[in-house]
């Protein structure tokens, strides 16, 4: 059994629970591609992966599936092949699209995941994923600015309202407050390192982005690792909590 070593860590019941779980990952770049692989290797039974972009040569320094052989190919389809190769029994939904804010609600209502990993860096769509997840009572962990950061020891997981030294998180919090949205329950992956201002470059303003920071090979991957770990631990803890509750009910019934 390919998950026997995972079972030694979590136990058979938790592994069975992961097999019954559904994780949605939006954004399959330097953060999301690694998160997706870690989720698949954990034995999660259903995944939905979303990205409308294709690989270009600048992705090679940080994205899991970016190679000379994949330049010009859709990130979702290339990654899908690897995930199925890892787990041929995986129930995989592949959405090759740039998700407009209004489409977020349709996707979540249709696929109904147990947990969302948000790995996009465009402000408006990111806000919509967070709001939709909260309103539909779906767990979400949102990954923030990995650009302009170099120190792996500064990458942290916390609640969104506790993030600091992250310009993207700051923007998101301000916009959510303007819309009257309470976001204390949203989990966040961020780096407390102050961004290197010299690594900033401007864009033409398309795809919701006006600028971007330089990136390393390892920081985005570390964000993806932290996000995946948070989701896997939550899902296995849910199983443990359910088991304890069931044992408690049985004990009370016997008494």
Image (cartoon, rainbow, N blue to C red):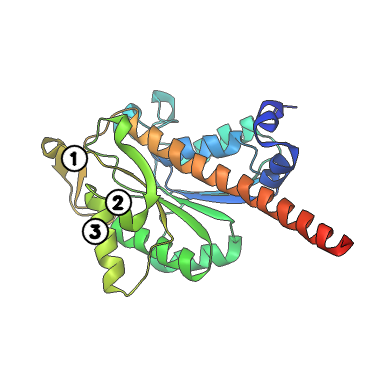
Residue found 47% across the figure and 56% down from its top: 140
Above or below, comparing residue 17 to residue 126 in the picture: above
The Cα atoms of the two marked residues, 3 and 2, are separated by: 11 Å
- Residue in the foreground of this view, choosing between 121 and 174: 174
**Which residue is most to the right?**
254
- Name the image quarter holding the C terminus: bottom right
Q: Tell me: residue 119, above or below residue 153.
A: below
Nearer to me, 160 or 72: 160
Instruction: Determine which residue is flagged by label 2.
Output: 163
Q: Position of residue 16 (x, y in %)?
A: 73, 43
Looking at marks 1 and 3 on the same chain, the residue that comes earlier in the sequence is marked by 3
Is label 3 in a helix, a strand or a loop? helix
Q: Callout 3: few (<14), some (14-19), or many (20+) C-alpha neighbours within 10 Å?
A: few
Image location (x, y in percent) of residue 250: 83, 58
On the image, numbered disc 1 is attached to which residue? 195
The answer to whether any part of residue 55 appears in the image is no
Viewer-proximal residue among 185 and 202: 185
Sooner in the amino-acid sequence: mark 1 or mark 2: 2
* Mark carried by residue 171: 3
Q: CA distance from mark 1 to mark 2?
A: 14 Å
Residue 121 rendering spot, x and y as whole percentages: 32, 50
Q: Is residue 90 visible?
A: yes
Name the element at disc 2.
loop
Left or right of residue 25, residue 149 in this image: left
Q: Are marks 1 and 2 in contact (CB under 8 Å)?
A: no
Name the foreground residue: 200 vs 156.
156
Q: Tell me the SS state at disc 1.
A: loop
Earlier in the chain: of badge 3 and badge 2, it is: 2
């Amino acid at each position: 059994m390919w998950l026997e070593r995972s079972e030694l860590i979590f136990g058979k019941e938790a592994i069975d629970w992961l097999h019954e779980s559904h994780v949605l990952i939006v954004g399959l770049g330097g953060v999301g591609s690694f998160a997706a692989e870690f989720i698949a290797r954990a034995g999660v039974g259903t995944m939905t992966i979303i990205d409308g972009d294709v690989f270009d040569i600048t992705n090679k320094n940080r994205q899991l599936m970016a190679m000379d052989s994949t330049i010009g190919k859709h990130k979702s389809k290339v990654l899908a092949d690897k995930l199925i190769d890892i787990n041929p029994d995986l129930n995989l939904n592949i959405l090759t699209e740039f998700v407009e804010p209004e489409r977020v609600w349709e996707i979540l209502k249709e696929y109904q995941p147990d947990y969302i990993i948000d790995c996009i860096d465009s402000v408006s769509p990111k806000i919509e994923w967070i709001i939709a997840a909260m309103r539909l009572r779906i767990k979400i962990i949102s990954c923030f600015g990995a650009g302009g950061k170099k120190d792996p020891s500064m990458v942290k997981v916390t609640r969104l309202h506790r993030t600091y030294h992250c310009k993207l998180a700051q923007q998101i919090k301000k916009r959510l407050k303007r819309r009257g949205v309470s976001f204390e329950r949203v989990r966040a992956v961020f780096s407390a390192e102050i961004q290197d201002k010299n690594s900033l470059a401007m864009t033409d303003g398309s795809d919701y982005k006006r600028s971007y920071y330089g990136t390393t090979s390892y920081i985005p991957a570390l964000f993806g690792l932290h996000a995946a770990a948070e989701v896997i631990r939550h899902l296995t803890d849910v199983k443990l909590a359910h088991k304890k509750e069931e044992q408690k009910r049985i004990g009370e019934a016997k008494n």
